Image: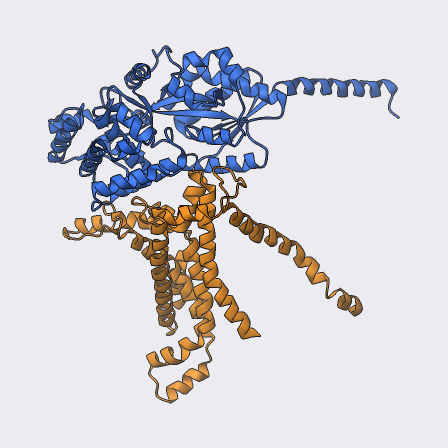
Amino acid sequence: MKPAFLTSLTRTAVAAIAVCSCAASFAGEVEVLHWWTAGGEAKAASALKDQLQAKGHSWKDFAVAGGGGDNAMTVLKSRVVSGNAPAAAQIKGPSLQEWAAEGVLANIDDVAKAENWDKLLPKVVSDVMKYKGSYIAVPVNVHRVNWLWANPEVFKKAGAKLPTNWDEFFVAAEALKKAGVIPVAHGGQNWQDFTTFESVALGLGGSDFYQKALVQLDPAALNGPTMTKVLETFRKVKSYTDKNAPGRDWNLATAMVIKGEAGMQLMGDWAKGEFIAAGKKPGKDFACVAAPGSAKAFTFNVDSFALFKLKNEANVKAQKDLAAAIMSPQFQEVFNLNKGSIPVRLNMDLAKFDDCAKLSAKDFVDTAKTGALVPSVAHGMAVPAAAAGALQDAVSQFWNDDKMSVASAQSKIAAAAKIK
Amino acid sequence: MSATTRSSGPWLPRLVVAPSFLLSLLFIYGLMAWNGYLSFSASRILPNYDFVGLAQYEALFDNERFRVAMGNLAIFGVLFIGGAMAVGVVLAILLDQKVRGEGLLRTIYLYPMAISFIVTGTAWKWMLNPGQGLEHLMHQWGFAGFSFDWLINPEMAIYCVVIAGIWQSAGFVMALFLAALRGVDESIIKAAQVDGASLPRIYWSIILPSLRPVFFSTLLVVSHLAIKSFDLVMALTSGGPGFATDLPATFMYAHAFTRGQIGLGAASATVMLATVAAIVVPYLYSELRAKR
């Protein structure tokens, strides 16, 4: 037989535990789907985790590596279909609108209003984060896509100078070729082909043409003479790449520039991470300049987290804290220093960032005012996935098939733009 | 005891088989039917059930990339199946000559089957890449004029997939045929020899015709390998250059899972299913009829 007092003691203990667990469940849990699993990206993600844990919420990591997010998307779809969505998932660009149209994303206007997001974000960026006027996602960072990365030592040896427009680009490429190096490091994958293509389009046609042709998919612009010139120039760029390019990963192409086997590469600012990991200093061991002719324009690739509708109220609270934390200056700084991108929040102190990032941030602010801040098609920011995929197919086919005429490529691109 | 066994006879086997029967009904045929249903819907990133009739199929057959994929399937299918069968049969016949070290040779030829298509694809990618593989090696050896750039040539790249595929599967065909050859009655061969038939003649007119069942089951295995082929292409060329080596399976994956066009992807999967059925159904029909 148990003494009576012991029983009551047990009861009290049970009650106490019950109270405790009640209090604990008041702080919610956030489950975040992302594919930042390697190197600097993983460090960047853990910064977010620390910040949320400091607020008393628990963080459930839902990292799905591989496939540039394809694998993660497949997992996400099955979770959402089975009614068990995570709090937030890494989704970007017009895909946000597609997810919102399925009615599974949460409205976070209250957080946005409290934190004044409309003032902190350029309008082109905040428009991407909204569905029917309400915020459904929170932006994390900005990558600039229209960069040209160059090895200054190779340029010096070849007697070439860094190009500021496409004519100079070909002069430099010719000099590099004579000096016996591969002028342009390229990886023949369709998104890389398109990254080059959109830099050519932006440099030759300017941001107005880019906006009309590749964002609004205006048939007149797509069939016009500027597009013809863009395609001709694009093909000419190919003649300065090496023939082993097909299938090469972007970081291997960057490595060619680092090692001095190649002179330059057209790639977004994630390439900087490769240079820095190889112990190179920006401005000294490698040069970052805007892609030829596009110094006054900016193609952006903004990563963001879509926020899903949740049932548990404590988790909703945690989700809102997550959204606020992502936009906070501390997180924006830590994350972007690790990731190599720049903060999406305007007017931040950039003292800790390197020169490439400072230039990028300055251009981001400037182009946001002039309207030359345009979304990148190659990185799924401008048009829905179906049309973007079809455009990439057409452009890649032209890049790989030297026999295809410019006219037929142009009509293929125009046809691809009609896919919905 | 024997009475219970007899009375449980009719229902016990059925009971034991029932779960797997139900599972395969649900997860194979059920999902096939669901996929077929989705191919008539307007599904984008998530499945939905807005009926759009044949619109997805119209879009599919209008899509140049899909036509390229189907054309590639025809090229790949014919050459891969034909090549793997031919090489496999020849190897089996040669090994059947009671050569010394047969066990070792058999293992060597069968070994490629033990590794995945991903490994095969990656290894062949390195070997066929002009900058680091065969062409590079030949240049280093002094044959400066040697050129083998199929892998990066949009018109020839599909043949690289064929080469790697045959390398992988020929050993498997060989093993099946070798086993069958060993099963051929020695006395028939002896009788033919007595009649003065030459060895090639014996193989061509007597042994190979008697292997008809093995021939068909091998054909069935190899042809479904060809139609569902996905990992080999992903590892070797990832569908490139451009989309020159796309197959229906890679097309389906790209559209259903990365481009948010589940309806279109489902339609292409249905077309693939129809292609498989076109091969399997006549075979099953002839086999079942023969047994009756």
Residue A86 lies, with reference to residue A357, above or below; the image says below
**What residue do we see at 11% from left, 31% from top?**
A175
* Quadrant into which the N terminus of chain A falls: top right
Q: Position of residue B10 (x, y in %)?
A: 72, 65
Seen at 36% across and 35% down, the residue is A388
Depth check: B227 or A3 in front? B227
Q: Is residue B197 visible in the rendered structure shown here?
A: yes
Quadrant where the C terminus of chain A is found in the figure: top left
Q: Give the chain coloured orange.
A: B
- The location of residue A52, given as percent across then percent down, is 53, 18
Residue A179 drawn above or below residue B280: above
Going by the image, does A9 lie left or right of B16?
A: right
Residue A98 x %, y %? 47, 32
Q: Residue at the spot x=48%, y=60% of the render?
A: B277
Left or right of B14 in this view: A5: right
Q: Which is nearer the eye, B19 or B283?
A: B283
Any part of residue B167 in sight: no
Q: Splitting the image into 4 quarters, where does residue A404 fall? A: top left
Q: Position of residue A329 (x, y in %)?
A: 43, 13
Q: Which chain is blue?
A: A
